[in-house]
């Protein structure tokens, strides 16, 4: 996610949304001011999560989101903030 996504509870809110949707993975702040997320879950849940990420937390201003898919599962146990 690019835009105003750090310091606005984006990762915390993403973790709450992921738990709500039974998604596992992680969210971390990047040095360039973006947030990087890896997520695993059911296709419908992931689509809802991606839609949420396009908006983000109440204070966020998401300008751009890059999405890529992989068939390689990492079998995350939870969704955490790194």
Image: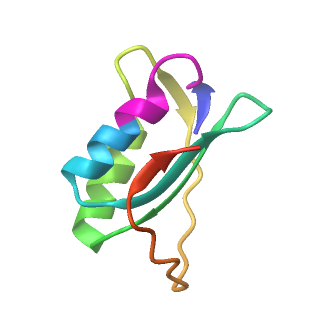
- Identify whether 80 is placed above or below 71: above
The x and y percentages for residue 14 are: 39, 39
Scheme by which the image is coloured: rainbow
Q: Quadrant of residue 67?
A: bottom right
Name the residue located 59 percent from the left edge and 43 percent from the top edge. 82
Q: Which residues are magenta?
A: 5-13
- Identify whether 58 is placed above or below 47: above
Name the residue located 67 percent from the left edge and 34 percent from the top edge. 34
The one of 24 and 68 positioned closer to us in this rendering: 24
- Identify whether 57 is placed above or below 69: above
- Identify whether 72 is placed above or below 65: below
Name the residue located 79 percent from the left edge and 32 percent from the top edge. 32
The reply to whether the magenta stretch includes residue 76 is no
The x and y percentages for residue 70 are: 55, 79
Quadrant where the N terminus lies? top right
Instruction: Please give left or right for residue 63 compared with residue 25 in the image.
Output: right
Q: How many marks?
A: 0
The reply to whether the magenta stretch includes residue 10 is yes
Name the residue located 34 percent from the left edge and 17 percent from the top edge. 58
The one of 23 and 33 positioned closer to us in this rendering: 23
The x and y percentages for residue 39 are: 45, 61
Q: Quadrant of residue 29?
A: top right
The one of 54 and 74 positioned closer to us in this rendering: 74
Q: In this view, which residue lies farthest toward the bottom?
A: 71
């Amino acid at each position: 996610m690019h835009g105003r996504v750090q310091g606005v509870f984006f990762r915390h809110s993403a973790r709450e949304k992921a738990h709500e949707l039974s998604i596992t993975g992680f969210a971390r702040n990047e040095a360039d001011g973006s947030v990087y997320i890896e997520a695993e879950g059911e296709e419908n849940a992931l689509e809802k999560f991606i839609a949420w990420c396009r908006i983000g937390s109440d204070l966020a201003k998401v300008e751009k989101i890059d999405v890529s898919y992989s068939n390689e599962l990492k079998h995350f146990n939870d969704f955490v903030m790194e």
